[in-house]
Image (spheres, helix red, strand yellow):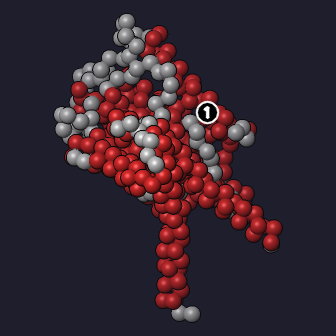
Amino acid sequence: MSEIDVKSKIKNSKIKDSLNALLFPLISVFLSLFIAVFFVMWAKKYSITDYFTALSDLMSIIVSSSFGSMQQILDTSVYVVPLIFTGLANAIANRCGLFNIGAEGQFTMGFLAASLIGLIPGLSVWVHIPLIIIGGLLIGGLWASLPGYLKAKFGINEVINTIMMNYIAMYVVNMVIMETHFGVKNKACTPIIQESAQLFRFISDSRANIGIIFALIAVVLVYLLMSKTTLGYEIRAVGINPFAAEYGGINIKSKMILAMFISGAVSGIGGALHLAGTMYQSNTMTSFIGYGFDGIAVALLAKNNPIGCIPAAILFGVLENSSRILQLNNIPKEVVSLIEAIIIIFVSTDYILKYIKRKKEIKGV
C-alpha cells in the first residue's frame, strides 16, 4: 500500500470517527424533542392526532423567542457565554478522567471575586477587566485544586469533594455579603461594581456583552492546549489509561492536579465575566446559580470537544432563554428541564455502550 493510500485511509477513518461522534448527540436531541412534545400535548390538552401541531407550537416558541430578532439573539448569548465556560471546564477535567462536579462552586467563587475586585476605584478599563479575569482564574483554579490534590495524593473521590466545595462556595458568598463591610447595609448584596469593571454591552436594551468574544477565545485556547501541546497530550493520556501514562513517564498525580486547576480556572473566569458583563453585583444565595451543573450537560453533549461546546452551549442556552416564553404560552417551563434531562440520558447511553464494548474486547483478548 502506497503512502498516499495510507494517508487517505487515515483521513477517511478520522471523518468516519467524527461522524460517529456526532451521531449520538444528534439522535439525543431529536429524541428529547420527540418525547417532550407529548408533555406539550398534555399541557395544552391536545389529542394524539395533534402531535405535529404540538411540535410546531414547541419549536416555533423556542426558535422565535431566541432568534426572532437581533435583541433576542443577543439575549440568548447571555445564557450561552457562561455555559461555554463551564462546558469547557468540565470537558478538561473529563479528558483527564476526572469528574468535576464542582464547576458550579468554581463559577460562584469567580463571580464573587469579580464583585469584590470590581469595587476597586480609580482603575482604567484596560487594567480593571484583566484584573477581574485574573482574579476569577486564580480563585477558580485554587478552588478546584484542593479536591484535585486530595484525589491525586490520597485517592479521595473528587465527585464527593467537589460537591461539598459547591456548598462551601455558596456559603462563603453569603458570609462575605452579610458579615463583612463588602455587603450593602440593610441589603443582601454587594455594591454595583465600578464602570471601569463593567464589560461593554452591545445595545442598551440587552445585557448581551463582549463576554461572548472572551468565550470564543477560551474555546480556541483550550482546543490548542488539549490538541496541540505536550501538556494536553499528557492530560489526555492520563484520562485514557493512567497506568500506561505512568509507564510512559508521565507524572499522573501532577497532571490530575493541574487538570483540575485549569478546569477550575476556566469556570472561575466564566463566573467573573458573567458578573462583570451581566449582573454587576453579588446577591446572597439560597440556591446555586446553575451554570456549573448545566456545563456538565454541555460537555457530555459536546463529547468533551472544546469546539463542540459552542453548539452544545447554544442549544442549552436557547432552551433556558425560551423557558419563560413557554410558560406564557401555557407550556410548563419544566419542559426545558425535561428536554435537557433526556439529552443527558441518551448521550450517557453512548458512554455505557462504549464501556460494555471495551469490557467485551478485554475479555476476548
Question: Which residue lies at the image location 53% right of the left edge and 93% below the top edge?
Answer: 2
Question: Which residue lies at the image location 36% right of the left edge and 7% below the top edge?
Answer: 185
Question: Which residue lies at the image location 50% right of the left edge and 79% below the top edge?
Answer: 12
Residue that protrudes farthest toward the bottom in the picture? 1
**Displayed quadrant of residue 241:** bottom right
Question: Which residue lies at the image location 51% right of the left edge and 51% below the top edge?
Answer: 35
Residue that protrudes farthest toward the top in the picture? 186
Residue that protrudes farthest toward the left in the picture? 204
Residue that numbered label 1 is attached to: 163
Question: Is 2 in front, or is 313?
Answer: 313
Residue 218 visible, this angle: no
Please determine whether, in this image, residue 219 is positioned above or below residue 158: below
- Pointer 1: residues within 10 angstroms few (<14), some, or many (20+)? some
Please determine whether, in this image, residue 226 is positioned above or below residue 213: below
1 relative to 180 in the view: left or right: right
Residue 2 visible, this angle: yes
